[in-house]
Image (tube, helix red, strand yellow):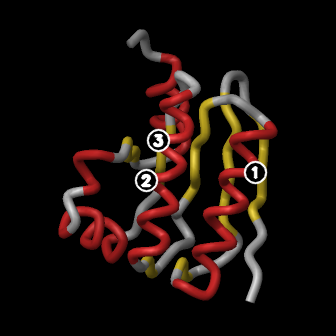
Amino acid sequence: MSINLHVTEHDNCIVARPETKDLRFDVSNEFKQALVELIEARPDHLVIDISDIEFVDSTALSAFIAAKSRLAAKGKTLVLFGQSKAVTGVLRLTSLDKFLNLMPDLDAALASLAAPA
């Protein structure tokens, strides 16, 4: 199984939307690699639209953590938005809701990047 990322550019960031409903082991490693390649090719802030995602497993969570760490090393930020109730539950259970930058929608995600640090 493979995964595609729909990528659009905004003023100071890239917005990526995984074209899948499930981020589980069979696609999460490919997802992680796609994020690494995107971060290396375009050193901008990264916003990930996860509004279509219904399920994440530990490999998907590790992809988010790795992307955040890689971006932070470049002085950039990772923001996720549109998380479903199920995904929010997993993020809360793992306390990643406190570690990752989560926003309700694209406008809030973009505004969070425009706000002074």
30 sits left or right of 99 in the view: right
x, y (%) of residue 117? 38, 13
The amino acid type of the residue labelled 1 equals: Glu
At mark 2, the secondary structure is helix
Q: Which mark is residue 20?
A: none
Q: Are marks 1 and 3 in contact (CB under 8 Å)?
A: no
Crowdedness near tag 3: few (<14), some (14–19) or many (≥20) residues, C-alpha within 10 Å: some
Q: Residues within 10 Å of mark 2 (few under 14, many from 20)?
A: some
Residue 3, image x and y in percent? Answer: 74, 75
In three-dimensional space, the C-alpha distance between marks 3 and 2, rounded to whole angstroms, equals 6 Å
Q: Are marks 3 and 2 in contact (CB under 8 Å)?
A: yes
User: Residue 19, position in %: x, y?
Assistant: 70, 72
The kind of residue on which mark 3 rests is Ser
Which residue does the numbered mark 3 point to in the structure image? Answer: 69
Residue at (55%, 31%) from the top-left corner?
Answer: 110
Kindly identify the residue that appears in the image at 36 percent across and 71 percent down.
87
Q: Is 117 above or below relative to 72?
A: above
Mark 1 highlights which residue?
Answer: 37
- Does the CB distance between marks 2 and 1 fall below 8 Å? no
Left of 21 or right of it: where is 7? right
Whole-angstrom CA distance, mark 1 to mark 3, is: 14 Å
**Residue occupied by mark 2:** 65
- x and y percentages locating residue 30 in the rendered image: 69, 72
